Image (cartoon, helix red, strand yellow):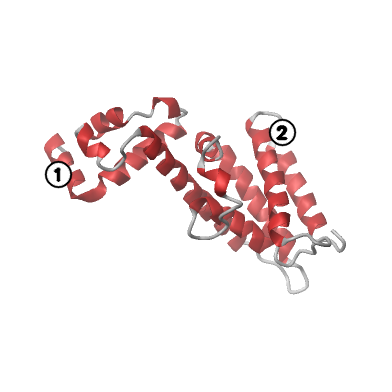
Amino acid sequence: MTQDMTRETYHHGDLKGALLRDGLAMVAAGRLEAVSLRELARGLGVSASAVYRHYPDKQALVAAIAAEGFRQFAATLTGAVGTVTVGAADPAGPQRLAAAGRAYLAFAGANTGLFRLMFGSGGPGRVAVEAADASNPAGQAFGLLMQCLETAPLAPEETLRQAAAEAWALVHGLACLHLDGLLPPEAGAAALTAYSQRRFSAGA
């Protein structure tokens, strides 16, 4: 494809998606600090001014990358929970919660740079608990945890949101320990299984 053809294609509307795609690739390669709108423009064969029409600055692009990360993250957790099958006599809650937690750990391990960006200081992860609904990419995963816990016994005066925040804190802590090389993944998975069973036990 010639540069002229590339420019024409992007002129018709997919430049924004291409910028996001290439930005994601740079983050995945551990090059977040190197993300540059001008560099991305050169790589795509378009002018810098064309890029700035979609993302006025690097911060706007990074925010979009983090939001896309949360969309992928929520889809991963939702898919994992959706695969859980249990017998008629078995409660689904513990298995669904553990499946979500294992998917959380797997996503963090497979997308280290993106995961750290998503939950970095000032990133969209800060609003996850406050906006646990499908309208906010950062809140979808937390909303899923709340759904997994809907049949769990709650302590007196404990709310479902509080229970989900506890689960979130546990699995996020395990993920960070794993990424920092302080906890092997199998130990994190075992801890999640034990927590899930305990969370759904009577009097939890």
Query: Which of the 4 quarters of the picture holds residue 132?
Result: bottom right
* Inter-mark Cα distance, 2 to 1: 49 Å
In terms of sequence position, does the residue under pointer 2 or pointer 1 come before the other?
Answer: 1
Q: Secondary structure at mark 1?
A: helix
Farthest top residue? 34
Q: For residue 104, which numbered disc appears in the image?
A: none
- Against 28, residue 164 (above or below) is below
Query: Which of the 4 quarters of the picture holds residue 133?
Result: bottom right
Q: Position of residue 169 (x, y in %)?
A: 69, 45
Amino acid at pointer 2:
Leu
One can see residue 135 in this view:
yes
Count residues near mark 1 (Cα–Cα under 10 Å), then give few for <14, some for 14-19, many for 20+: few
User: Decide: marks 2, 1 in contact (CB < 8 A)?
Assistant: no
- Against 40, residue 161 (above or below) is below
Count residues near mark 2 (Cα–Cα under 10 Å), then give few for <14, some for 14-19, many for 20+: some
Q: Secondary structure at mark 2?
A: loop
Question: Residue at 15% of width from left, 35% of height from top?
Answer: 3
Quadrant including the C terminus: bottom right
Query: Which of the 4 quarters of the picture holds residue 91?
Result: bottom right
Horizontal side of 73 relative to 81 (left or right) equals left
Per the image, the residue denoted by label 1 is 8
Nearer the camera: disc 2 or disc 1: 1
Horizontal side of 64 relative to 14 (left or right) equals right
Farthest left residue? 4
Closer to the camera in the image, 5 or 202: 202
Q: Position of residue 35 (x, y in %)?
A: 38, 29
